[in-house]
Image (cartoon, helix red, strand yellow):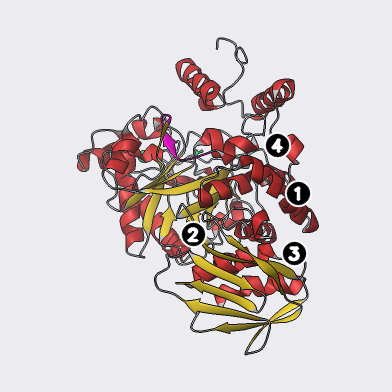
């Protein structure tokens, strides 16, 4: 039933008497909408032994274009005689068909009238397929679940210290040295599969830090040019791409051109997070580039580096997105938007960015990083998220595109573990982003049917009982997480923050996760 779906519609439906019944065939009458908007729905219906056929006859699904609707908005009138769906675009059609599909009770839909649209334009998941590799079939399984809850962006983290995941014909050594990867055909297939489900795929190539995956194959691109091994544990690796060597740009430009051509999203994510600059500090090439371009410091060198890449991507029609770390630079690309994850003492930088009329997506790490266990980020906390800075809500603020959960996979190797971390917390995000949450009790009630659906499709999930641990149970979960983390961390001195920074990080974690007092010594 419509009243059981996640995300809850933003608008109130009118529930009517009667039932729309469908078995065998459903006739599709559509005007000028593109084929791709109907494909996922038709595939799902097949599993219910219903075939979508074009022509005339009953029962009928009539799809009408209405230019007054917003991009993803849809109208549904489900009556016993047939269904009418209105939308302005195929993306609206996809969302309407998803609501229709989720409202089926076996072969019936209780009648209703609804006009619905999302609160936020950007409702995403960032999926790290680099720390651990998940094959194309697993990515598509996750896309299908995202689509059923109307999430509309997969931000695909395809490069990092632990690997390089895109088939590259311009730099094939990346694929020989840096672990498993997606072929270009697989990537195109995933992009098309996602599009049919209303999802845009934004690739991320993280630069200039988190690049051991590149440097393991092409070590000459670092400042010192020494060999490095592919990363194994998590952490921040100290050797990064040199910003001063000409050959770095000669390497990156064709690589970015190649990658950009595989995706149809107008956005290209260049990462830019956690860039340790100790190598740059010592490097004559970096120093020369900074001097020649009148750059005040190494943060500005990162801004200049990113601007050069952004200009290249602009020629391919792409707008660049970076993590908010880049806001330390005064030399930002003109066409840039931001993904916020944490305020590394950049207080004010995000506010100033939004004040200038620029756009940002919100992924607060203490609420939306789903690799953290439920003891740190319970289901209800995700559900209640709204974009905020320093405790101030940004709901309704211009330039706030929406929200995105992230899953980093340093500690997640198996698909089952990945799914358990994602579900059902990703559903909570979907509802928060579509209709602004506001009905947690109802969400838990509606979740029962959703979890049964996951079980039917063989997708793993965390049970509702395990989703909001409290008291001793929570404490045990937290301790286990930090102990395992300490054991799993690479022991290199170079990766450890200095004591002052460590204290700052601990305080931030204690506040962000609302940790019990005394968990860390000295807290
Ligand atoms: C990040 O978590 N380093 C974006
Ligand atoms: Zn350098």
The Cα atoms of the two marked residues, 1 and 2, are separated by 29 Å
* Residue identifier under label 3: 105
Mark 1 or mark 2: name the one nearer the start of the chain.
2
Label 2 residue near ligand 1, CB within 8 Å: no
Q: Position of residue 447 (x, y in %)?
A: 70, 48
Label 3 residue near ligand 1, CB within 8 Å: no
Highlighted range, magenta: 385-391
Magenta portion: prevailing SS class: loop
Q: Nearer the viewer, mark 4 or mark 2?
A: 2
Which residue is more in the foreground, 279 or 109?
Answer: 109
- Residue 150, image quadrant: bottom right
Q: Secondary structure at mark 1?
A: loop
Q: Residues within 10 Å of mark 3 (few under 14, many from 20)?
A: few
* Residue identifier under label 2: 117
* Residue identifier under label 1: 460
Q: Residues within 10 Å of mark 4 (few under 14, many from 20)?
A: many
Q: Nearer the viewer, mark 1 or mark 2?
A: 2
Q: Residues within 10 Å of mark 1 (few under 14, many from 20)?
A: some
Q: Nearer the viewer, mark 3 or mark 1?
A: 3
Q: Position of residue 425 (x, y in %)?
A: 64, 43
Magenta-span inclusion, residue 435: no
Q: Secondary structure at mark 4?
A: loop
Q: Position of residue 387 (x, y in %)?
A: 45, 40
Which residue shows up at 57% across the image and 80% down it?
Answer: 62
Which residue is more in the foreground, 287 or 305?
Answer: 305
Which residue shows up at 62% across the image and 82% down it?
Answer: 28
């Amino acid at each position: 039933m419509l009243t059981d779906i996640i995300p809850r519609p933003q608008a109130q439906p009118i529930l009517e008497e009667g039932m729309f019944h469908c078995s065998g065939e459903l006739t599709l009458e559509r005007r000028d909408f593109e084929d791709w908007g109907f494909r996922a729905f038709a595939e799902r219906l097949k599993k219910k032994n219903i075939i979508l056929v074009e022509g005339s006859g009953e029962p009928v699904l009539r799809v009408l274009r209405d230019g007054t609707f917003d991009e993803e908005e849809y109208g549904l009138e489900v009556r016993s005689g047939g269904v009418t769906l209105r939308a302005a675009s195929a993306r609206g059609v996809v969302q309407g068909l998803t609501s229709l599909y989720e409202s089926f009770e076996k072969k019936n839909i209780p009648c209703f009238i609804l006009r619905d649209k999302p609160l936020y334009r950007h409702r995403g998941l960032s999926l790290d397929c680099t720390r651990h590799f998940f094959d194309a079939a697993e990515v598509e399984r996750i896309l299908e679940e995202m689509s059923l809850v109307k999430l509309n962006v997969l931000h695909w983290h395809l490069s990092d210290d632990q690997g390089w995941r895109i088939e590259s014909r311009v730099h094939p050594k990346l694929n020989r040295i840096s672990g498993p990867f997606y072929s270009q055909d697989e990537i195109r297939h995933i992009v098309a599969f996602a599009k049919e489900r209303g999802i845009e795929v934004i690739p991320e190539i993280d630069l200039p830090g988190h690049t051991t995956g590149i440097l393991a194959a092409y070590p000459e691109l670092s400042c010192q040019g020494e060999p490095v091994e592919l990363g194994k544990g998590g952490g921040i690796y100290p050797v990064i791409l040199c910003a001063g060597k000409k050959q770095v740009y000669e390497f990156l430009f064709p690589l970015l051109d190649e990658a950009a051509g595989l995706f149809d999203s107008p956005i290209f994510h260049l990462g830019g997070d956690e860039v340790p600059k100790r190598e740059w500090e010592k490097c004559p090439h970096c120093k020369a580039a900074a001097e020649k371009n009148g750059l005040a410091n190494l943060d500005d060198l990162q801004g200049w580096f990113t601007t050069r890449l952004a200009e290249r991507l602009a020629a391919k029609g792409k707008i660049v997105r970076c993590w908010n770390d880049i806001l330390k630079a005064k030399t930002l690309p003109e066409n840039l938007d931001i993904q916020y994850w944490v305020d590394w003492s950049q207080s004010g930088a995000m506010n100033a960015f939004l004040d200038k009329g620029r756009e940002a997506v919100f992924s607060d790490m203490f609420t939306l990083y789903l690799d953290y266990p439920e003891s740190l980020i319970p289901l209800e906390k995700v559900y209640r998220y709204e974009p905020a800075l320093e405790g101030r809500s940004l709901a309704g603020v211009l330039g706030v595109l929406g929200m995105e959960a992230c899953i980093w996979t340093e500690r997640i190797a198996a698909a089952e573990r990945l799914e358990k971390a994602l579900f059902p917390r990703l559903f909570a995000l979907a509802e928060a982003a579509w209709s602004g949450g506001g009905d947690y009790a109802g969400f838990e009630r509606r979740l029962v049917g959703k979890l049964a659906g996951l079980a039917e499709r063989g997708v793993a999930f965390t049970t509702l009982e395990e989703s909001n641990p409290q008291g001793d149970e929570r404490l045990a979960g937290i301790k286990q997480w930090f102990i395992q983390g300490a054991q799993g961390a690479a022991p290199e001195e170079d990766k450890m923050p200095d004591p002052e920074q460590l204290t700052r990080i601990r305080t931030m974690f204690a506040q962000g996760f609302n940790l019990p007092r005394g968990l860390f010594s000295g807290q």
